[in-house]
Amino acid sequence: MIIRKPDFDLAQATVVWSRVPEFALYWNGASAVIPYVEFYLNNVMSEVRKAKGAGDPALDAELAIFIAQERNHAHYHVAYNKRLYDAGFGALKGLIETITAELKVLRDKRSLAFNVAYCAGFENAATFTSRYLIEQCDADFAGADPAGSNLFLWHVAEEFEHRSVCHEAFNAVSGRYFTRIAGVAYAFWHINHSFDRAAKTILDVRRAGMTEAERKASRKVVAAIKRRQAWHTFPRVLSLLNPWFDPASIRPTPKIEAALAFFARAEVPQESFTDAYASRSLLGA
Ligand SMILES: [Fe+2]
Ligand SMILES: [Fe+2]
């Protein structure tokens, strides 16, 4: 794991960065929520470092990089979210306060083990999302504006890279199977519910100026996007029930490795990673 700080021009990023507007708007909803989950993750993992770091230097070192990566993700998404608020999606602010309050209740009322299991569940979901966005969504990222699209592709590539850190932190803190399953199940429900609420807020604003026929068409596109992701995720979620589940055994694909190398480069990306990868593949490089 390394810390990457790709140079995206987020101040100029477009809100509808995909040729499929609903795809961009759905993921913009996730962007609105993400920093507050990542602040929470880092808060929990900082406590794990304090409790277990001295006795497990390897885990401590991984957690330090994990926290730095998540801090960067949050920082970039906060910058991008300013674009969303400026573009007329300020209604997100009230929802973000609600979600932040839900995470605070989780942190204050539940055990450290349950909170670490929630973090592991979020990481499991992010690992599956990484495979989905990088491998299954080429048509949505083709020809996309580089800043917005690469924000998501860089983020999920690093999510794949640190896919086992919270799982290992959970094993250090508890390791109890039923606690992991309960935390993971709650995380999947809560994160999906949060992303959906944010996406609905954005899409409601977007659809306000549409005709009824356009609204219907937009709802159909979003339903297809969600169905496609559910088909990708569902069989993988079942693997989490295995008591010996080990996220490190999910190997990176060549395309995920290419994404991690692409975003480690110093220059400003002039195209989405998806386009860069496709053109190099066509050249046989
Ligand atoms: Fe992240
Ligand atoms: Fe993460």
Image (spheres, rainbow, N blue to C red):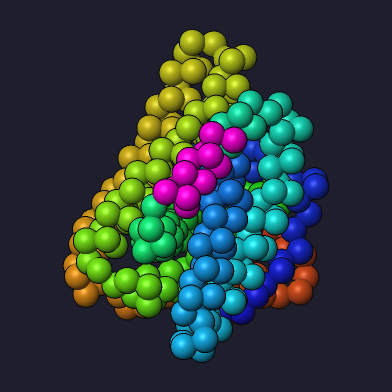
- Image position, residue 193 (x, y; %): 41, 38
Residue 71 visible (yes or no) = yes
Reply above or below: 154 against 30: below
Q: Is residue 105 magenta?
A: yes
Which residue reaches farthest top? 212
Residue in front for this viewpoint, 75 or 206 = 75
Residue in front for this viewpoint, 250 or 240 = 240
Q: Is residue 285 left or right of residue 114?
A: right
Q: Quadrant of the C terminus?
A: bottom right
- Image position, residue 27 (x, y; %): 54, 43
Q: Quadrant of the N terminus?
A: bottom right
Name which residue lies at 71% across and 66% down: 6
- Image position, residue 89 (x, y; %): 66, 29
Residue in front for this viewpoint, 10 or 173 = 173
Name which residue lies at 39% across and 52% down: 110
Magenta-tinted stretch: 97-109
Q: Main secondary structure of the magenta part?
A: helix
Q: Is residue 168 magenta?
A: no
Residue 143 visible (yes or no) = no
- Image position, residue 159 (x, y; %): 50, 65
